[in-house]
Amino acid sequence: MPDQIFIFAALALYFAAMLLIGWIAFRRTGDHEDYMLGGRDLPPWVAALSAGASDMSGWLVMGLPGAIYVSGLIEAWIAVGLTIGAYLNWLLVAPRLRAYTQVSRNSITVPSFFENRLRDTTRLLRVVSGVVILVFFTLYISSGMVAGGVFFESSFNGDYLTGMLLVTGVTLAYTLFGGFLGASLTDVVQGLMMVIALIVIPVAAIVAIGGFAETGTLINEVAPDHLSMLSGTALTGGTVLAIVSSLAWGLGYFGQPHIIVRFMALRSPQEAKSARRIGISWMVVSLGGAVLSGLVGLAYIAKTGIDLANPETVVLLMSQTLLHPFVAGLVLAAVLAAIMSTISSQLIVCSSALVEDLYGVFRRTPPSQKTLMLMGRLGVLGVAIIAAVLAITPNDTILGLVSFAWAGFGAAFGPVILLSLYWRKLTNWGALAGMFVGAATVFIWKALDTGLYELLPAFVFALIAAVGVSLVTYRHDDEIQQEFTDTGVMLALPRPHAVGDTP
């Protein structure tokens, strides 16, 4: 019982800190743009850590270590693909999207950027984008809630539903009132907690086992194939398909609204470079720690003989058996941080889709800032309730739920984002075709169960559809061409570009 008191004290401290940050953000949120985008005033380190923390979710400390534990380093190709994808996202998308969204009528959401950038007078592009966000993010948020329930079930032998509702409730509270700034500031703390935990846990386990040599020997005895990235059988089938599928995860970054919205919130396009260095450094250490935790966990379980019912809880089990209860409680809080940071970011994007891209489109008169903020908070609440209902009886693993939603966004939005930033001839009809083909292919390919991750074919087909339809429907527009040029001018500026300036 004393051990439990230490653990609960650490968790209570963490929950209190998150709520406090949410309250501070609430005091600094003055209007709708503040609530949705933090006033475009995020420093590089906040944007970098926030993007990383909101990206990784419970998958980083539960899903990935569990996959490595079961299948070995063949699953580490996911980490390689993600690192490459994240780097290219920061390099190619971040600075240009930050500049272009400001130039193109100060767009504060991804769907509004599509509409403004392509001068879509039909409003279809904005509505379809908003619907895609709601569908896939509801599934994505549900996966985070499942992770919260599994966390409490495995850590405290508690009730899954109680744990899921507790995690959902606290996350909802600070997101509901703190908005984008609250989500971003809590992400910074959560990101730091995650990376520290993923360093401490494998190191402590290696020491307990008896060193690197003993750890390697045990892994070889239990599962020799686990130490090879080129052999073994992955969950998806053959080795080649597994490697290609894992690397394809990197394509998903170009279309993740909860990540690229951090780019839009940077203080200036020029600060994307320093943010990239911070973000990728955090990512390499975090992913490396997660992969190592899965491998070391295999050796630790073999040496101790502890029963591990669910491989996705290997990090939780090691933290509780290796560390002082209070420190273990902080590690458990880091696991919660991974889960909650993603849920909060995705709730904000869903809220923006509902308010900016659906509610706002069908209003004849512009609503007041007060009404917009109220609707934004109601949107957060509504999506959270639907996702919680879906999470009551989960029918897939955490990694499975995340992979499907990741593919949906990557295929529906990724090609359109890249083309809108770098190709002058993209049209609204081309963008619509790309979104539809990308989203539909994800569903169809998943049902076919070919062994190849659905994101890869869906991304390629969406890109082809967007380009093909755009070439057929392209009409020259002077305003669109001028904005494309102005974006390049803003990127070339030697100084930070303030919100409201004109290039």
Image: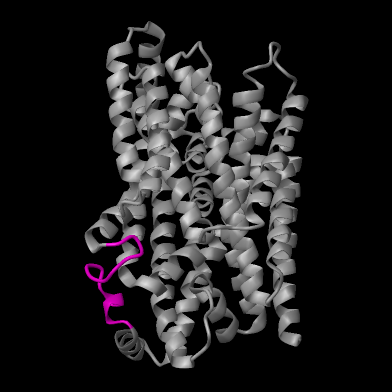
Please tell me which residue is depicted at 76% across the width and 41% down the height of the picture.
27
Please tell me which residue is depicted at 48% across the width and 26% down the height of the picture.
101
Which of the image's four quarters has the N terminus?
bottom right
**Rendered position, 280 above or below 289:** above
| 175 relative position to 313: left or right | right
| 216 relative position to 6: left or right | left
Q: Quadrant of residue 94?
A: top left
- Residue 141 visible, this orientation: yes
Residue 135 position, x and y percent, is 55, 38
Outermost front residue: 448
Q: Main secondary structure of the magenta part?
A: loop
Q: Nearer the viewer, residue 273 or 327?
A: 327
Please tell me which residue is depicted at 38% across the width and 67% down the height of the picture.
288
Please tell me which residue is depicted at 23% across the width and 70% down the height of the picture.
231
| 242 relative position to 386: left or right | left
Q: Quadrant of residue 160?
A: bottom right
- Residue 424 visible, this orientation: no
Residue 357 position, x and y percent, is 59, 25
Residue 402 position, x and y percent, is 49, 53
| 200 relative position to 72: left or right | right
Q: Nearer the viewer, residue 77 or 71?
A: 71
**Rendered position, 48 above or below 297:** above
**Rendered position, 88 above or below 126:** below
Which of the image's four quarters has the C terminus?
top left
The magenta region covers 223-237
Indicate yes or no whether the magenta region holds residue 236. yes
Indicate yes or no whether the magenta region holds residue 447. no
Q: Quadrant of residue 7?
A: bottom right
**Rendered position, 190 above or below 499:** below
